[in-house]
Image (cartoon, coloured by chain):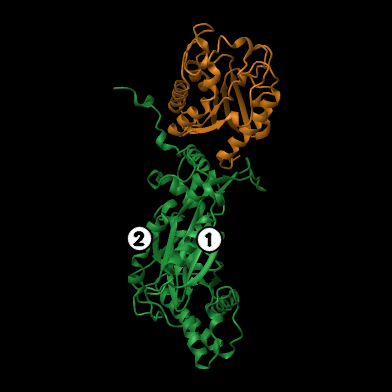
Chain colours: A green, B orange
Amino acid sequence: MPDMRFAPPNPLRIADRASGLNAVSVRSYNERLLLSLLLQNESISRFEIGVKTGLSAQTVSVLVRSLEQEGLVAKGEAQKERGRVGPPTVPISLNPEGAFSVGVSVGHKHTDVVLIDFVGSVRFHATLPNPAPDQNSNHSDFLETVKKAIELLPGETHQRLAGIGLALPEPGDGAHNDPTPPDLRFSALQEEMENEIGFPVFVQNDITSAAGGESMFGAAKPLSDYLFFYLGAELHSRLILNHQIYYGNSSLSFDVGIASLERCLQDINCPTEPLWDRAGAWPDYGQIKESWETSLVDQMKRSFNALAQFVEIKTIVLSSYAPQDICGAICENLESSLIGVKAIAGIITPSPKAIGAASLPFSSRFMVENKEK
Amino acid sequence: MRSVLCFGDSNTHGQMPGGTPLDRFGPQQRWPGVMGRELGPGWHIVEEGLSGRTTVRDDPIEGAHKNGRTYLTPCIQSHTILDIVIIMLGTNDLKVRFNQPPSEVAMGLGCLIYDIKELSPGPGGTIPEIMIVAPPPMLDDIKEWESIFKGAQEKSRKLALEFEIIADSLEVHFFDAGSVVACDPRDGFHIGRQAHEDLGVALAREVEAIGWANEHV
């Protein structure tokens, strides 16, 4: 029996030295643990990584080295914190160019396609009409747009695309006046995209995607526990505890969203196009908007109070593609009537769902399943 | 106070390129001294550089005392407690008399890593931080040393990768000195004054990057 200490070194434990991303199967639990921390924090030192993961400094050193070689992680400049005894700390953060992801969100009327980098910056965004159920659909248009986004990555960076995230609405979402349920319409989409485009496609509920996007790249990054609202055609909510997005069997949503405002405006023959324009601002809708906002905020308060019987939540995050000032006003309104609660408007633009969808390949490929604090 | 042991060969000893072991850079000029200056007053630097030292091989010509493995144990026990052990060796193992490929030199380093882990000379009997430093590759022209080192130049360029593989496998820190310094053309395998300065600074940054808890004074 040879002394196994002196068996040949096991090179499987180090990163593949070829360029591009490692195969999914090679990524170890510890690498995912470390990438999870980096996706949840702007930057972090090797010492803090050790404290948070329980890994030894030497193990962290090996992991960081292999992720650096892979181009996923970048070393920062040493920083001497004021008042701190001991040597300066060297922060480590994600390399923005280390990985890319495409997000596709099929919404109420439009489909959004984005390309984001590893820190969530949007490199490409396009809005197109939803693919229609009939054979005259713009399906090929849709695939072309996704391909166009991917082509923005030149040469070798092409291999750094982690995948495509697809955010789909619940089948029962009432605001869709199309008779064919979206799940049937888009069930083949995942397979078709994988075959046509050649990258793995990850599918997720669109509200959960939006929550995931705010959590990874947006206003909720530093938060671990909060109630998340998504204001779209309807009002949706998710509960986030310890960074985990709870998505139960219930796909309950409330018809107090932008679609309800649209109906009120249509009743008085007021133009409603600006409501669905992602980049624009809403005109002054006066009293109609005021009373809509009141009923919306009332519903949000009811949801919050119902939840408050079971868990103590101090923070509300509101995500929407509605203009920032609209969301800001709703948050102020909420804060003034819910004492001690902080309401934060999401900061992800232009499409929280699509950017959230794009975060899905990152979390699937790089994070541990139970996101560690 | 933290202690760092610098365990190496003539390039840790500070031997001047083209000189003999008696031609030595001053304590402030050698890389351990530079590193100590950069790390600041909280660190105690122990210099253990011996000209001709190998990883695990008795030298049939220069003597058995050149064997790094034999000397490592008494050396470490003499300097306990150690927070970090930095090892920069490998060049002398490439002498013709040993006839070793780079992978075997890396295996030798692996032995030293195991020995340090078994000795556990860290605070409270723990394993200290261990940092493997791959020496900068030799230059093609090594003057009168060509006969002693015949064929070593090519092998020396492969040491960094072999060392990194063993460092990754055994989970220790690794630094490639060849990424910041080159050997001096005066003899082709020793590093000059500026290289000592650059290497000392680079290694201080590497030591800091490990991350250290605030010292309870």
Q: Quadrant of residue A168?
A: bottom left
* Quarter of the figure with the N terminus of chain A: top left
Residue at the image point whose x is 64% and y is 25% from the top? B182
Furthest residue in direction left, as rendered: A1
Q: In 3D space, how far apart are the residues under numbered discs 1 and 2 (Cα atoms)? A: 28 Å
Q: Amino acid at mark 1?
A: Phe
Report whether residue A143 is seen. Answer: yes
Residue at the image point whose x is 53% and y is 46% from the top? A73
Counting from the top left corner in percent of width and height, residue A59 is at 46, 38
Determine whether the residue tagged by mark 2 lies in a helix, strand or loop: helix
> Is circle 1 on the same chain as circle 2?
yes
Which one is nearer the viewer's eye here, A252 or A353? A353
Counting from the top left corner in percent of width and height, residue A65 is at 51, 39
Furthest residue in direction front, as rendered: A136
Q: Chain of mark 1?
A: A
Mark 2 lies on residue: A191
As displayed, is residue A121 above or below residue A133? Answer: above
Which one is nearer the viewer's eye here, A42 or A302? A42
Which one is nearer the viewer's eye here, A276 or A64? A276
Q: Is residue A248 shown left or right of residue A49?
A: left
Q: Amino acid at mark 2?
A: Glu
